Amino acid sequence: MLAVALEDAAVPVQEFFNQAKAYHPHCVTLYLLPPLPEEIIGDERTLPPSDFALRRPCSREELRQVMAQAMEKQRLLEEVASLRGQNVTREPISGAVAPVAMPQGSELSLARIGQILRDFAKTFSTNFDLQNSLTLFLDAINAFLRPSRVSIMVRNPHSRTFEIRAHQGLVPQVAEQLRLREAEGLPLWLLTEARIIQRSEVENALHNPIFLEIHREMQALKSVASLPLMVSGKLVGILNLGDRVSGLPYSDNELDILFSLASNVAISIQDISLYHQVQSQKAFTEKILRYMSSGVLTIDAHETIRMCNHRAASILGKNWADVVHGDLRSLPSPLGDMFYETLQDGVSYDKHEVTITAAKVPLEVSTYQILDDQLNVSGSVMVFDDLTSQKQLYEERRRAHQFDYLNKVASRMAFEIKNPLVSIQMFIELLDERYHDAEFRNQFSRVVSQDIHTINVITEKLVSLASDIAYQFELGDVNDLLHALESTLNFERKPTLTDDSDDAVADLTGIRESSGIELACQEGLPVVRFDAEQLYKALMYIVTYLSQNTDSKKILVTSHYRHPKANTYTDGRILISLTGKNAKVDDEELEKLFDPFDAEHHTLVDIGPSVSQKIIEEHGGSLDFHLEKKGELTFEVTLPVGI
């Protein structure tokens, strides 16, 4: 029986409670106090004795909890009265062993044990819902031990504190704000000792500062016993029990049973936490993959596609759902073949450029294997990017560069051709009136011939620089080319390298009459694959530049073989050096030497080194230079050995 009294009722509260107790000795009383006026801070009046009291206004949940506790106490009082009324002192049967007396509170029937196990079993069937699992766990404890207050704390891995995740009977504001540091007080003691701690044990050791802190924490939790929830030596939670509604203490058997059940609940808490961590990581990874600009595919050891992000499906022109769980062979060629080679043969591709056969889409593909803990192949990954936009951008840049280059060529060519045309035009205008002047005719012929030759040289250099050259490569000895160059510059007979080409004779404009070359060649050089006419021009342009920009009477030209390994011509190089002394250029001018349209160039004769570099690089070689402190300017030409 439950008696509920209101202060504003017609019958006085004390008299009402006395009548209820007289009518039913095991009646439980509940006193609903009126609201406290705002001007009154505390209620100092003497209240009538009652089992439970609750001040209005109160929430529905608070009323429900108080009612549940009152009903539990009433049921316990009736059970105790019933047990006391039974005759438990019967004589034992002759020859039988007398039953061992059980401690108080440990009498559990098989039906009660079965009900307890069923209640606790519900905790493990919550489908990874931690809050629901903890609530069912506390409900099972409430049905088993009937505590007035109970709470369970779970470790927060981010703040390294224990927080109340489920409770019954605690003030909500306190439960939300209470935090226990994992390396102090109650959590540290439970982790170290790994056993149940009771408040009576703590109160007997308050002279120790550690137990003083534990006592404050247990008082805040309204706990008379705290149980550690341990998994593999780690504290994952703390179970706190308040006083029983009946006022009776917890027996050792009850706490032992609860400790065993709590250990299994601890495993459930850890498993649920790990599950949510995995789910969180999975969602995070899926978000990364979804918004990646690259396509990502993964396959397992059975050649089944396990993952395909949306970018990969978009590049392949397929639906995401149609790709996942499909066979490797469903991928377009050559992606499937590359995936198979990586999985079976361990062939890894790093930014390998391929084109999808069907859609003609250029891709940059990288693949690698996935290994498990035993270093066995468990699958492979493919990452690829669509190069279509990059190709288009590169083509647009190339065209813009070519257009800009053409504009510069046309502008510079017009400027360089204008000067000789002015002199030619002037002589032509004076030719009629001064035709009979022999000196004028000789000067006219010499100047016009020189200007026409200059225009021809300018045109030839610009064509070589701006257009593709049709090379006619042949194997030969570069020393023969150097001897021909020596003959030309030492004013001997100009060699004709081809029977029907006047372009073989390089430009001698700007070379001082006193200049020549001093040749020092290494004999027995390996053959080189080169175009004699074009390489001759390249070397002549370098000699011309040295003659104009140094005060050297002789240009030193040497050749020798440079090889990476002794006694072998494999991957070797032929090195040709051209050196002039007393250079008239500084380092700043030389830095812009290979820029054909630099503003420092006064004439297009200065672009000779740029043309030489282009010709030599298209021979598979390189052209470099260095200026010594003593004024020596050296150009180095390297050419690969022919096969």
Image: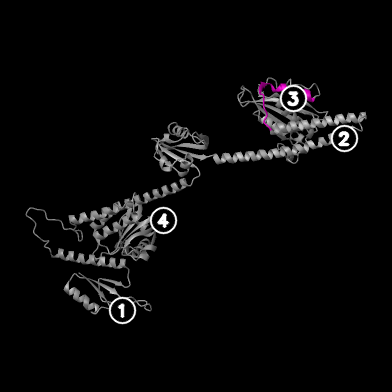
Question: Which label is found at residue 160?
Answer: 4
According to the picture, the residue beneath numbered tag 3 turns out to be 504
Residue 233 visible here = no
Q: Can you say which quadrant of the picture contains the C terminus?
A: top right
Comparing labels 4 and 2, the label whose residue is closer to the camera: 2
The magenta stretch spans residue 472? yes
Which quadrant of the view contains residue 229? Answer: bottom left
Secondary element at tag 4: loop
Which of discs 1 and 2 lies nearer the camera? The answer is 2
- In primary-sequence order, the first of circles 3 and 1 is 1
Disc 4 and disc 3: Cα gap in Å?
Answer: 85 Å
Question: How far apart are labels 4 and 1 at the CA level?
Answer: 45 Å
- Residue tagged by mark 2? 429
Q: Nearer the viewer, mark 3 or mark 2?
A: 2
N-terminal label among 1 and 2? 1
In whole angstroms, how far apart are the C-alphas of marks 3 and 2?
A: 34 Å
The residue nearer to you, when weighing 230 against 286, is: 286
**Residue found at the very far left of the displayed protein:** 94
- For label 1, count other residues whose C-alpha is less than 10 Å away and answer few (under 14), some (14-19) or many (20+): few
**Which residue type carries mark 1?**
Arg
Q: CA distance from mark 4 to mark 2?
A: 100 Å
- The magenta stretch spans residue 95: no
Instruction: Identify residue type, mark 4.
Output: Arg
